[in-house]
């Protein structure tokens, strides 16, 4: 279930945002251990009695501390690159709880994942299937695969993150599926174990899932009738959260009830790949006001955070909650265009946002930033990547991205492939 503005505000007060900014600098990402676990437990509890593995989509937040938390709490991982695979292994995910998705797997990606012994490759094209067969055969290994099917369903989400329509680059088209399974059954080094789908992200309605699940059920029956072993059904991720501009969101419970309704008693293991719904509500981007600038007819609140730190508003026109860390009920309110310092007009977090009057140096929180925040950050304008802090009660573990990359993830510490 998504959490709203009030709860996010409460979190920040509990976490003493001012202290964090003083200790770690501004801006910084702050993740709540408690909220991450609450979100995971919502899936795990709703899956009680199902043979289901919740594989966190690492692309949503690949911070090592976050991954360690999810691994220790019993999740699996969905990865889309060798970098994500290495982080997942380094964080403690067992290889046999890792699935590998993505349309562009290289030979190196495949070889590393095969040697690590991952649970499943989600294969997205015939050339990929042929390449995987070659790589596995050369290594004397077998690749367990599911074919990612494109069910041609409109997920009703932003066009840049819809993946389940026929015109999208993802998956095998509905018409080609049986032919591709027939090929897979013939290829050496390939072992068919399941089917896979993922129709898009930030889905706020159950109807697209319902349509896609129905198609998957029919497909599984057809494939089984053709003699293929299908014992795993990977339903992807995509469940949306309640951003301030979302008209609705679907709760994890309602989503899982739909999963149960369609797939319980089918004798198949289920894999789910949620990303955003596990991490988004557990993170904020803390920052400070740098300047208050009067323009003709409007006031700009210039923050020290920018589009390079949190790209979603600039890239998708996404709306995130913005609020001052200290509440100021005594102050007059003001309408601001909330912007960052980067030299692009698109570096805007919010237009005409009503906030209490704020002054330079005062702290501001940007909510719903635990997913697709730090992972999409860049060094544009040659700005440094910002720290990420995982906070639990009194203890906070600083996890600086730079340290992770340069030290914690150095090659000699990599798991032995
Ligand atoms: C294959 C795959 N699985 C899972 C996810 C996670 O999606 P979300 O973060 O919307 O749950 C994505 C991203 O959309 C994806 O591409
Ligand atoms: N980056 C997107 C989600 C993409 C999902 C990846 N398949 C976002 O911030 O909403």
Image: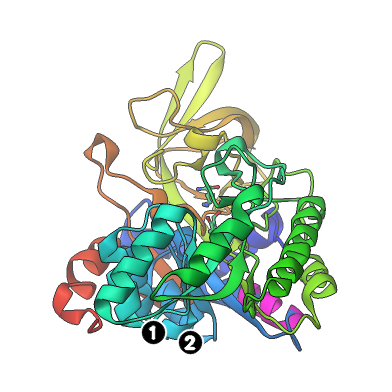
Quarter of the figure that contains the C terminus: bottom left
Foreground of the two, 326 or 98: 98
Which residue ends up furthest to the right in the rendered image? 261
Place of residue 213 in the rendered image (x, y in percent of width and height, measured from the top left): 76, 61
Which residue ends up furthest to the top in the rendered image? 296
The response on whether ligand 1 sits within 8 Å of label 1 is no
| Residue underneath mark 1 | 92
Colour pattern of the rendering: rainbow
From where the camera sits, is residue 312 visible?
A: yes
Mark 2 vs 1, N-terminal side: 2
Place of residue 178 in the rendered image (x, y in percent of width and height, measured from the top left): 63, 59
Q: Residue at x 26, y 35 (%)?
A: 381
Q: Is residue 45 magenta?
A: yes
- Residue 72 — which label? 2
Q: Is residue 38 magenta?
A: no
The span picked out in magenta is 39-46
Which residue ends up furthest to the left in the rendered image? 412
Foreground of the two, 135 or 205: 135
For residue 384, above or below residue 41: above
- Residue 231 — which label? none
Secondary structure, mark 2, is helix
From where the camera sits, is residue 18 visible?
A: no
Foreground of the two, 79 or 171: 171
Badge 1, how many Cα within 10 Å: few under 14, some, many 20+? some
Classify residue 159 by image quadrant: top right
Query: Is the stretch drawn in magenta largely helix, strand or loop?
Result: helix
Question: Is residue 281 toward the left or the right of residue 68 in the image?
Answer: right
Badge 2, how many Cα within 10 Å: few under 14, some, many 20+? few
Q: Residue at x 23, y 74 (%)?
A: 408
Foreground of the two, 352 or 269: 269
């Amino acid at each position: 279930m998504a959490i709203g503005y009030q709860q996010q505000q409460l979190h920040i007060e509990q976490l003493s945002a001012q202290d964090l900014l003083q200790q770690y600098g501004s801006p910084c990402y702050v993740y709540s251990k408690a909220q991450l676990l609450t979100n995971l437990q919502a899936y795990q509890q709703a899956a009680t009695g199902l043979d289901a593995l919740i594989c966190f989509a690492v692309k949503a937040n690949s911070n090592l501390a976050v991954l360690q938390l999810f691994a220790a709490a019993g999740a699996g991982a969905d990865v889309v690159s060798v970098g994500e695979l290495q982080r997942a292994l380094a964080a403690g995910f067992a290889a046999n709880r890792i699935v590998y998705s993505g349309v562009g797997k290289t030979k190196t990606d495949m070889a590393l994942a095969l040697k690590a012994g991952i649970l499943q490759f989600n294969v997205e094209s015939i050339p990929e299937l042929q390449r995987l067969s070659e790589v596995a055969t050369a290594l004397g290994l077998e690749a367990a695969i599911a074919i990612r099917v494109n069910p041609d369903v409109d997920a009703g989400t932003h066009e840049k993150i819809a993946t389940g329509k026929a015109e999208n680059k993802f998956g095998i088209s509905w018409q080609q599926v049986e032919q591709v399974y027939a090929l897979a059954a013939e290829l050496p080094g390939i072992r068919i174990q399941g089917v896979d789908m993922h129709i898009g992200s930030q889905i706020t309605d159950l109807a697209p899932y319902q349509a896609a699940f129905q198609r998957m059920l029919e497909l599984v029956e057809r494939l089984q009738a053709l003699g293929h072993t299908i014992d795993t059904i990977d339903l992807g991720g995509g469940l949306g959260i309640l951003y301030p501009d979302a008209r609705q969101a679907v709760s994890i419970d309602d989503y899982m009830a739909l999963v149960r309704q369609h797939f319980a008693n089918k004798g198949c293991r289920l894999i789910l790949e949620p990303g955003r719904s596990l991490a988004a509500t557990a993170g904020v981007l803390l920052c400070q006001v740098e300047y208050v600038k009067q323009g003709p007819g409007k006031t700009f609140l210039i923050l020290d955070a920018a589009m390079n730190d949190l790209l979603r508003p600039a890239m998708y026109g996404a709306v995130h909650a913005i609020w001052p860390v200290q509440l100021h009920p005594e102050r007059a309110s003001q309408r601001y265009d909330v912007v960052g310092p980067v030299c692009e007009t698109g570096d805007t977090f919010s237009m005409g946002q009503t906030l209490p009057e704020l002054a330079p140096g005062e702290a501001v929180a940007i909510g719903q930033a635990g997913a697709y925040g730090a992972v999409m950050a860049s060094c544009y304008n040659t700005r440094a990547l910002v720290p990420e802090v995982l906070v639990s009660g009194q203890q906070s573990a600083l996890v600086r991205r730079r340290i992770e990359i340069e030290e914690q993830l150095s090659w000699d510490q990599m798991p032995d492939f």
